[in-house]
């Protein structure tokens, strides 16, 4: 069976067993890598509504955001202030 292409992390982002994002991380201090991830989230959110396929930009922003949260937790530990999507939705609905 033919494998579906991943529009978020296509094969051209990999060189052998090394992914580009991991090489970028290895070249930076943790706080600089976090800033790179944050900037990537902002970039994709900034332009998503100007693209022919905005869903891809939103998925990329989400991927970078998830990676930022993961890196932050790995660096500083889990924090009870991090909300689940259910908590965010409940808070948006109000009391």
Image: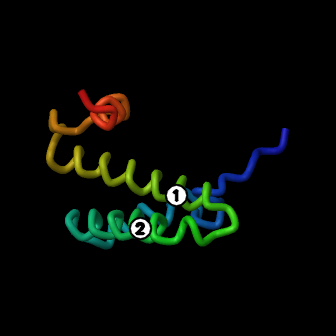
User: How far across and down, in percent of the image, does residue 18 sit?
Assistant: 50, 60
Say which residue label 1 marks: 60
- Look at 44% across and 71% down and name the residue there: 43
**SS at mark 2 in the image:** helix
Lateral position of residue 60 relative to residue 80, left or right? right
Front residue of this view, candidates 57 and 90: 90
Say which residue label 2 marks: 40
Q: Quadrant of the C terminus?
A: top left
Which quadrant holds residue 40?
bottom left
**SS at mark 1 in the image:** helix
- Mark 2 vs mark 1, CA separation in Å: 9 Å
Lateral position of residue 63 relative to residue 85, left or right? right
- Look at 27% across and 68% down and name the residue there: 35
Mark 1 nearby-residue class (10 Å; few <14, some 14–19, many ≥20) = many
Q: Marks 1 and 2: in contact by CB < 8 Å? A: yes
Q: Is residue 88 above or below residue 32?
A: above
Label annotation for residue 31? none
- Look at 30% across and 48% down and name the residue there: 69
User: How far across and down, in percent of the image, does residue 57 sit?
Assistant: 56, 61
Mark 2 nearby-residue class (10 Å; few <14, some 14–19, many ≥20) = some
- Look at 48% across and 66% down and name the residue there: 44
Lateral position of residue 80 relative to residue 28, left or right? left
User: How far across and down, in percent of the image, does residue 60 sit?
Assistant: 52, 58
Residue sticking out furthest to the front: 95
């Amino acid at each position: 069976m033919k494998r579906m292409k991943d529009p978020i992390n296509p094969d051209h982002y990999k060189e052998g067993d090394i992914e580009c994002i991991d090489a970028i991380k290895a070249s930076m201090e943790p706080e600089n890598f976090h800033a790179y991830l944050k900037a990537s989230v902002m970039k994709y959110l900034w332009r998503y509504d100007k693209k022919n396929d905005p869903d891809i930009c939103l998925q990329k922003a989400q991927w970078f955001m998830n990676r930022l949260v993961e890196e932050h937790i790995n660096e500083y530990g889990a924090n009870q202030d991090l909300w689940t999507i259910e908590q965010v939705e409940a808070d948006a609905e109000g009391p």
